Amino acid sequence: MKRNTLHLLVIATLSFHTAAFAQGSLTPPIGAPTPVMKSLDQIEPRTPISSVPFTITKPGSYYFTTNLAVSSGTGITIATNNVALDLNGFSLTSNETYSLGYGIQIKADLRNISIENGFIMGGVTNNGSDVYSGPGFSIGIYSIYPNAKNVRVARVALSNCKQYGISVGASSSSIVESCHVTTIGSVGIFAEEVMNSAAIDCGSKGIEAETVLHCRGEASGAGTGIDATVVSHSQGISVTGTGIKATTVENCYGNGNVGHGIIAVTVNNSVGNSNDAGNGIQSTGAVTGSRAYSRSGTGLIAVVANNCVVQKGSGGRAIQATVANGCYNIGGTNLITYKYNMP
């Protein structure tokens, strides 16, 4: 009797749950299924660019669909605010004989421009004597003065231009990051802030900016590798000019093969080198925790030198300072007014 009662209770319970959670019909609705997801164009409307010259006159997002070549003049002209241009991994090239056009031109006094992810190439070469000539673009990316504000150039490799590589203004909220520029007749990169980038084989200056961080700038002739207000964790190299010229230099390497290694007001934890008659480090303020070398110029010139090591390749002056504390020289003689914690 008890067993029969238990069986009835179980059956009643199962019947209750079946009724409470009964499913709908398993027969599919009549007709083909309809899409329920949005397309990429619905999420982010973008305009393709498949030929040049091309002028952008409406705000929005644009992208390359293939490699593009310019026979003369400018490839892309940005003539409105709020534009994002994605090269999409493709290249923009020019074989113009007289190198007069621009790869990408940004009209004057615009706002909010982004250019990224591709290649811009001309045919200009350096003959080995700092004479840049050949076909291609005059400037790779150029913001006409008064420069556009809030410009960002990222992940662009640019080469072989007659004058500038990337020129977007040094006081216009412009940022150049993760770019590589090479073989440029004048200035490789000119912007307010340059990060994680390199400008190599540039006739006048490798990088000119307000702030330079984690970069490498090289001037092929008498120019400056990096010319900025603040330079940090970077390398500046010049064949016959100055490696780094700035107000503040920290954690950097500056090399003037013939000229000066570093010229700055304040230098911290850096290395300045001259393989000829230039000065290793030349400062109008304080130099701290740094190393300097000059073959035949002065190793270190500063008002105050703290805990520095200076090496001279031949006779001459090693350290020239008003105050020197805890410094050490290898070769050469010192000219120090007040000396502390030194031999």
Image (cartoon, rainbow, N blue to C red):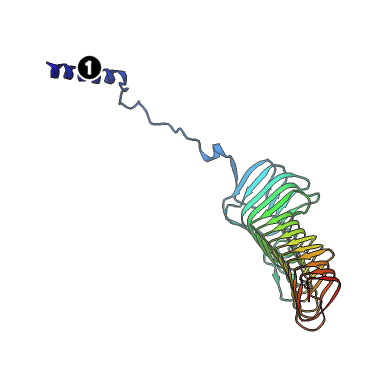
**Quadrant placement of the C terminus:** bottom right
Q: Residue at x 68, y 50 (%)?
A: 152
Query: Can I make out residue 212 in this image?
Result: yes
Residue at the outermost left position: 1
Name the element at disc 1: helix
Residue under label 1, please give it.
Answer: 12
Q: Position of residue 273 (x, y in %)?
A: 74, 73
As drawn, is 67 to the left or to the right of 195? left
As drawn, is 324 to the left or to the right of 193? right
User: In the rendered image, which quarter is residue 17 located in?
Assistant: top left
Q: Residue at x 22, y 17 (%)?
A: 12
Which amino acid, mark 1? Ala
Q: Position of residue 26 (x, y in %)?
A: 30, 26
Residue at the outermost bottom position: 315
Nearest the viewer among 192 and 138 is 192
User: In the rendered image, which quarter is residue 294 located in?
Assistant: bottom right
As drawn, is 1 to the left or to the right of 32? left
Q: Residue at x 74, y 48 (%)?
A: 173
In the depicted structure, whether residue 329 falls above or below residue 208: below
Q: Residues within 10 Å of mark 1 (few under 14, many from 20)?
A: few
Nearest the viewer among 183 and 74 is 183
